[in-house]
C-alpha cells in the first residue's frame, strides 16, 4: 500500500491524542486524571495558534490508516503561541491545572529552545504494531524537510533517557545528545536528553546545549 505524509486537520483529534501520549508517556505519571487530559489535548489540537494545534501536526498514512504522527514548529512559534496554549489548557483542565501547575511550568522550561534558526520537534510517535517498518524514518525525514523550508539550521528534540530504542534511532539518523534535563514536579521526576542535528553540516549548535535540572514552582 501507498505511504504518504500529510498535515492533520482539526477534526482528527481522536487520532492525535493516543499518538501524542505514546510520544510523551511521562505525562500520565504526572497527571492522574487522564480523561480530563485527553479532552484538553483534543481542544488544543482543534484550535489554531496553539503549540499542539493541527497546524503543526502531520500524520503518516499507510493506505487509509494513520500509523504515526509528528508535531513540530520553528522556535519563534513557541513565543507567539505559549500564552494562548496556557489559557486554553487552564480552561480545559480547570482545577487540575492548579494541582499540576508546577508540572506545566517545569515542562515549559525544560523544552525551551531559544535559537531563532532552530526547529523544535515536539513529538514523534508510531503505533506499536507499525514500528520498525520505516514509518518513523519517513516522518523524521519529512519534518527535517519542513525545517529546511523554514530556513532552520538545526532541529532539536527531547527524548526520555530510558527510551534507549528512540535514542539509538535518532543517533543513526545524525542526532547527537547535547545535554540532560531532570523534570521535577511534586516529588516526581523524569529525565530527558536534548538531541540536536545540524541540517547543513552535522555539527551541534552551542545554543541548544545544556545540562541542568528544571524544577516546577
Image (cartoon, rainbow, N blue to C red):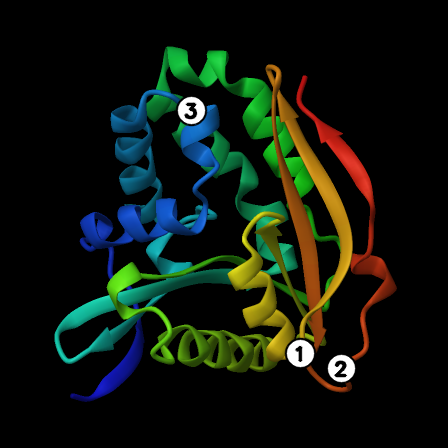
Q: Is residue 115 visible?
A: no
The one nearer the camera, 13 or 48, is: 13
Image coordinates for residue 70, horizontal then vertical, percent: 41, 63
Q: Is residue 41 above or below residue 31?
A: below
What is the crowding at mark 1: few (fewer than 14 residues within 10 Å), some, or many (at least 20)?
A: some
| Secondary structure state at the residue bearing disc 2 | loop
Q: Which residue is mark 3?
A: 31
Q: Is residue 5 above or below residue 8?
A: below
The one nearer the camera, 178 or 106, is: 178
Image coordinates for residue 15, horizontal then vertical, percent: 22, 54
Q: Is tag 2's residue or tag 3's residue first in the polypeptide sequence?
A: 3
The answer to whether the residues at label 1 and label 2 have Cβ atoms under 8 Å apart is yes
The dot on residue 174 is 1
Task: Give the Cα distance between marks 1 and 2.
Answer: 7 Å
What is the crowding at mark 2: few (fewer than 14 residues within 10 Å), some, or many (at least 20)?
A: some
Image coordinates for residue 208, horizontal then vertical, percent: 78, 58
What is the crowding at mark 3: few (fewer than 14 residues within 10 Å), some, or many (at least 20)?
A: some
Amino acid at each position: 500500500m501507498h505511504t504518504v505524509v500529510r498535515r492533520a486537520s482539526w477534526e482528527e483529534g481522536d487520532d492525535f491524542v493516543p499518538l501524542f501520549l505514546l510520544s510523551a508517556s511521562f505525562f500520565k505519571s504526572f497527571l492522574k486524571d487522564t480523561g480530563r487530559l485527553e479532552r484538553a489535548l483534543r481542544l488544543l489540537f482543534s484550535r489554531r495558534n496553539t503549540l499542539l494545534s493541527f497546524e503543526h501536526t502531520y500524520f503518516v498514512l499507510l493506505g487509509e490508516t494513520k500509523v504515526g504522527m509528528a508535531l513540530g514548529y520553528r522556535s519563534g512559534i513557541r513565543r507567539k503561541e505559549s500564552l494562548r496554549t496556557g489559557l486554553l489548557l487552564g480552561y480545559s483542565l480547570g482545577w487540575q491545572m492548579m494541582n499540576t501547575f508546577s508540572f506545566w511550568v517545569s515542562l515549559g522550561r525544560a523544552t525551551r529552545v531559544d535559537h531563532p534558526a532552530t526547529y523544535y520537534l515536539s513529538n514523534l510517535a508510531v503505533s506499536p504494531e507499525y514500528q520498525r517498518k520505516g514509518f518513523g524514518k519517513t516522518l523524521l525525514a519529512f519534518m527535517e524537510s519542513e525545517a529546511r523550508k523554514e530556513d532552520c539550521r538545526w532541529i532539536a528534540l527531547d527524548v526520555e533517557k530510558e527510551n534507549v530504542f528512540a535514542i539509538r534511532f535518532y543517533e543513526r539518523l545524525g542526532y547527537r545528545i547535547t545535554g540532560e534535563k531532570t523534570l521535577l514536579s511534586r516529588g516526581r521526576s523524569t529525565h530527558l536528553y536534548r538531541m540536536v542535528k545540524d541540517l547543513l553540516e552535522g555539527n551541534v549548535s552551542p545554543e541548544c546545549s545544556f545540562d541542568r535540572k528544571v524544577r516546577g514552582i
